[in-house]
Image: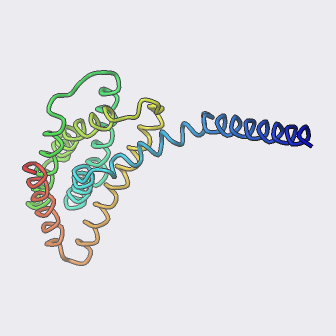
Amino acid sequence: MRLSFSKGMSAKVLAASALAATSGTALAHAGHEHVSSFMSGLMHPMGGLDHLLAMVAVGLWAAAMGGRALWAVPAAFVIAMVLGGSMAVSGLNLPFVEQGILLSVVVLGTLVLGAKRLPVVACAAIAGAFAMFHGAAHGAEMPMTANGIQYAIGFALATTALHLVGVGLGQLATRFGTPVVTRISGSVIALAGVVLAVA
């Protein structure tokens, strides 16, 4: 009786060990690693109010200007942000990253508030300059185990989605003849940037 109990226990221990080893292998699979890296990148811009506000502001500003700015300004932001992230991952440190991010919220909100129309190239340059700071923050905070390319794809897509939210809100306000809503949004964003800076 004792012998059969021992055999039964041994079989259970062996089965449990095999199951644990199999699940560990599955979690360490490259596909899971890529999904995890992608999700980390996708969620990173969503985790900070400063990132959210700046990226929505870019979309609102682009929508207020219309024309080529509608796609050129958000595209410049995303491209420069990925470049800033790549620099951070490669060990190149951009100074005053946090200050640059907070300044971007205030300035971009103010540009939306004032419905400032500048040449598209100048708008893209402004967006790109601020995007470098956001990208540097994303790159510096990338998990050590993350796949850099998958992580970058994640935060680039999240940023694009936030830009589209801003563009959509701006176009809705224009369509319904209430551009004042966009300006109010800009003032709220700029004020929030000031609050975050002094907090």
Residue 19 lies in what quarter of the image?
Answer: top right
Res 7 → quadrant: top right
Query: With respect to residue 19, does 62 lie above or below?
Result: below
For this view, does 75 lie left or right of residue 28? left
Residue at the (33%, 61%) spot, across then down: 165
Residue 188: give x, y in percent of width and height. Answer: 13, 64
Instruction: From the viewer's side, name the closer residue of 57 and 126.
Output: 57
Task: Identify the residue shown where x is 16% and y is 51%.
Answer: 105
Identify the residue at image location x=23%, y=71%.
174
Horizontally, residue 186 falls left or right of residue 75, namely left
Q: How many marks?
A: 0
Work out whether residue 52 or residue 197 is closer to the camera in this orientation and state it.
197
Residue at point 37% right, 34% down?
Answer: 142
The image's colour scheme reads: rainbow
In percent of width and height, residue 39 lies at: 47, 46
Residue 179, horizontal then vertical, whole percent? 17, 71
Question: Left of 187 or right of it: where is 59?
Answer: right
Q: Quadrant of the N terminus?
A: top right
47 lies above or below 84: below
